[in-house]
Image (cartoon, coloured by chain):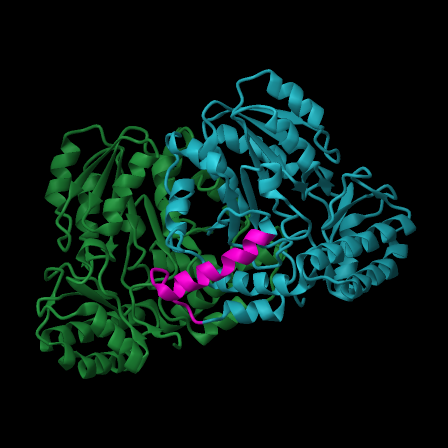
Chain colours: A green, B cyan
Amino acid sequence: MPKPKLFIPGPVDISPTTYEAMCSPIIGHRGKDFETLYASIQPGLQKIAGTERPVFLSTSSAWGVMEGAIRNLVQKKVLNLCCGAFSDKWFDVSLRCGKEAEKIQAEWGQPIDPDLVRAKLREGGFDTVTLVHNETSTGVLNPLSDIATVVKEFDDVLLVVDTVSSFSALPIPTDEIGVDVLLAGVQKAMALPPGLSVFVVSERALQRAETTHDRGYYFDFLEFEKNHKKDNTPSTPSISLLYALESMVASIMEEGLEKRFQRHSETNAQVHKWVKENGFELFAPDGFRSKTLTAVANNRDIDVPAFIKAVRERHNFLINGGYGKIKGKTFRISNMGNETTLTMDDLLCALSEVLPEFT
Amino acid sequence: MPKPKLFIPGPVDISPTTYEAMCSPIIGHRGKDFETLYASIQPGLQKIAGTERPVFLSTSSAWGVMEGAIRNLVQKKVLNLCCGAFSDKWFDVSLRCGKEAEKIQAEWGQPIDPDLVRAKLREGGFDTVTLVHNETSTGVLNPLSDIATVVKEFDDVLLVVDTVSSFSALPIPTDEIGVDVLLAGVQKAMALPPGLSVFVVSERALQRAETTHDRGYYFDFLEFEKNHKKDNTPSTPSISLLYALESMVASIMEEGLEKRFQRHSETNAQVHKWVKENGFELFAPDGFRSKTLTAVANNRDIDVPAFIKAVRERHNFLINGGYGKIKGKTFRISNMGNETTLTMDDLLCALSEVLPEFT
């Protein structure tokens, strides 16, 4: 079977331009050529990340940095805000790092309630909060600014935010709202092959890290800061993916961030329209819906795996059949990355063509 | 300036075949297509790694797995065998993970003496030993089998071996000599772009990990084992590099391991011959010399950076000017990866052409 065009919520389709960039000749990473490459990516990445701080590059999936944030910052107790597969798992990972952790658990499909965060933090003893901005498993976009405002009410509590599937698709004013660690993998809205993560660390988070024991080396935030000053990374980086990132950041700057946000909004609205017109419901509530993917509630009780298989076989498009415990009860359609209203039309027409056989 | 052909000790030049493989269409990593890709790489990798155990794939540089081994295995105290920049750093990383650690420090350029390892282990209290097989900074090939034999004399002491710059270039009988963790990055002798590491974990090392606290998630050996059983990885892997790895493993199997080892031996001997004919000395002692790179002692006291610059400018070849505290006192020439006697001849002729101006 040929490889399908991906409309799953990451990884997504890679453009020919990106592939071409990936094939630039490899260079040594301890020399001028690499430093030039590294430095050239910073200004664009900073704009996308809404920060004047450096944007560090980690050769790992986002989970590496998610664990790294726990190891670097948690000295007392972390509060993990859980509302889906990835945010739930962060609580588990906190415990596996030997840290004290508590969680707020929202039902899958629901966002985190900032008032509950305030109430929990008032109990005291916390020094770190983790949030998944756009919970990829449920299609929920959490109220980042409202939660950041709440966390700010508490001195010495740091906010760590995973934006894996929102980064570059909507505004994230990191510095303005006071996010202490912002992190993302590049294989979702950035439409690069997986294997690289980007992250921002606030001054006060770096200060916290300085007094945290057992941070290790590979994800030590202070090592990233130290090497950044030399336009470099602590360990051998994924150089081919850095070339791809350089190319993608340039193309995002060329498109313009506002236009990029608008494009994601429009393609997302297209999917929502299809969902409603076809008698399905959106899994996430109004006001808290992801702009990069849509989790569709399977209220028509179709055979999701068979539907997806038919779409792939007849049209060579791949959508996703739901994640973890809501597999089959939902299915997911991604509009992240390089998709346009035209390419989304192609997909939605294909879905419409196949759907009647399954209802 | 055009990008030079790399004769530095990793990363090294990438073949067009590898680049082509890297550009295969991206697939989701939680589906059949990915499982097929993952499984197809195993048999070849196991042969290269000299093991019947699975070969795990970590989306990180080798340092990630080097740190991971410490976090997974050290419960009492680790003995780090140090004889160059990378092996020395492993001791530092052990401490940064909050572990008790001691070291044996050989002079840079000298190998580890197995008798000293025995004497140290007899002091008691150790449960883990780390060794860098081929110390890339000094061109020293350590006596792996002899050290493994010594470690075996001690019950419940595990041996962790980094083979970053020897993996696939010479026989490493992992199972036979009883290495508990064998690890390597793919950007050295495997000649792939950096960003991926491969590693093998023995049954008894997995058993140790089961009772080790605070292993975390990203490098948790038990997670790798669990996911391997589903032909998968714990976190989103670097899919493009897996395609590249699949292609490289196939090409290594086609070349034949014995022939590959022989090729590295021959190209290495070519470099040694050039070194001697040109009045230089080898930095590593006879019997302990790397087969994949040569650290040349700068006994003629040439201006190494200027020499390297001239070779690059006039011939577009890049060699390395020495690492860390032996920068300039040594320079390094790599013959690892896809190089042949013909391509090495090109380099050595270029070096010969430029050298007279610097002596």
Q: Nearer the viewer, residue A105 or A356?
A: A356
Prevailing SS of the magenta stretch: helix
Does B182 sit left or right of A10 as displayed?
right
Does A143 sit left or right of B36 as displayed?
left
Give the percent coordinates (x, y) of residue B319: 73, 55
Query: Which quarter of the picture shows residue B317?
Result: bottom right
Is residue B126 positioned above or below A104 on the image? above
Is residue B319 positioned above or below A9 on the image? above
Is residue B297 positioned above or below A238 on the image? above
Residue drawn where x is 37% and y is 51% of the image: A62
Does B181 sit left or right of A10 as displayed?
right
Residue drawn where x is 49% and y is 43% of the image: B64
Q: Nearer the viewer, residue A205 or B210?
A: B210
Work out whether residue A132 can be spotted.
Answer: no
| Residue B194, magenta (yes or no) | no
Residue drawn where x is 61% and y is 40% of the image: B176
Residue drawn where x is 42% and y is 56% of the image: B237
Is residue A11 positioned above or below B306 on the image? below
Does B260 sit left or right of B347 as displayed?
left
Give the percent coordinates (x, y) of residue B334: 72, 53
Give the percent coordinates (x, y) of residue A250: 44, 68
| Residue B27, magenta (yes or no) | yes
Q: What range of the chain is rendered magenta?
A: B25-47
